[in-house]
Image: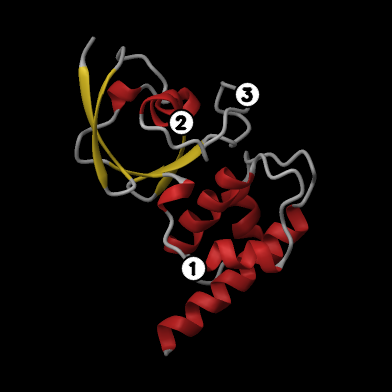
């Protein structure tokens, strides 16, 4: 088996796995970050969303061999403490069952990193494909707007 070098949450890891192993299983089983969830296994639900170089990807359908050692992978465990999106999620009481939330939060974080003041349509577009069985989409949108506002205030201070 080949050895892959990955940077996950700013830490370098060497993993000895088959080249077609999905990133999800490398993160969960080899590196032991379990916040990233398995949902559908086909990249359709978004529960497995992680960030690669700041962009959301579906880790369940991304073979580890497609990643470069220079790629920066961020999981829910890698978000900074006091992250505006996570705080807004709590304040808006977004989670119900919570299963999809790590993927949702990472997708929202990626959106706000590129769009400081998203419209409802921007939010809907960025979050499309991240499915929530509990239907907390209105609270997610509210939390994203709140996080955007908090980020903007922090930048002005």
Mark 3, secondary structure of its residue = loop
Note whether 12 is above or below 126 in the view shown: above
28 relative to 108 in the view: left or right = left
| Quarter that holds the C terminus | bottom left
Q: Nearer the viewer, mark 1 or mark 2?
A: 1
The CA span between labels 1 and 3 is 30 Å
Image quadrant in which you'd find residue 51: top left
Hey, which residue is sitting farthest front in the picture? Answer: 32
| Quarter that holds the N terminus | top left
105 relative to 62 in the view: left or right = right
Note whether 70 is above or below 90 in the view shown: above
Q: Of the numbered discs in the image, which one, if any, rests on residue 100? A: none
The CA span between labels 1 and 2 is 25 Å
Where's residue 22, x and y in %?
42, 21
Give the mark, 3 or 2, whose residue is nearer the N terminus. 3
Note whether 22 is above or below 18 in the view shown: below
Estimate how packed mark 3 is, as few (under 14), some (14 to 19) or many (20 or more) residues with alpha carbons within 10 Å.
few
Query: At x 69% / y 58%, what residue is drawn?
Result: 140
Q: Which residue is mark 1?
A: 82
Where's residue 9, x and y in %?
34, 47
Is residue 119 in view from this perspective? no
Q: Which residue is mark 2?
A: 59
Hey, which residue is sitting farthest right in the picture? Answer: 134
Q: Nearer the viewer, mark 1 or mark 3?
A: 1
Q: Which residue is mark 3?
A: 40
Note whether 42 is above or below 8 in the view shown: above
Mark 1, secondary structure of its residue = loop
117 relative to 5 in the view: left or right = right
Mark 2, secondary structure of its residue = helix
Estimate how packed mark 1 is, as few (under 14), some (14 to 19) or many (20 or more) residues with alpha carbons within 10 Å.
few
Query: At x 49% / y 70%, what residue is drawn?
Result: 116
């Amino acid at each position: 088996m080949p050895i892959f070098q990955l940077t996950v949450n700013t830490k370098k890891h060497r993993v000895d796995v088959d080249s077609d192993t999905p990133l999800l299983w490398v993160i969960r089983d080899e590196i032991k970050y379990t916040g990233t969830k398995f949902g559908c296994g086909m990249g359709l639900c978004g529960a497995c969303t992680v960030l690669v170089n700041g962009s959301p990807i579906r880790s369940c359908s991304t073979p580890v061999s497609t990643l470069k050692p220079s790629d920066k992978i961020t999981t829910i465990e890698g978000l900074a403490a006091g992250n505006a999106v996570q705080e807004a999620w709590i304040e808006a009481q977004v989670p119900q069952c919570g299963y999809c939330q790590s993927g949702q939060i990472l997708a929202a974080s990626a959106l706000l990193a590129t769009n400081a003041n998203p419209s409802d349509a921007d939010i809907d577009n960025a979050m499309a494909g991240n499915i929530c069985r509990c239907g907390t989409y209105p609270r997610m949108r509210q939390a994203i707007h709140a996080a955007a506002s908090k980020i903007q205030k922090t930048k002005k201070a």
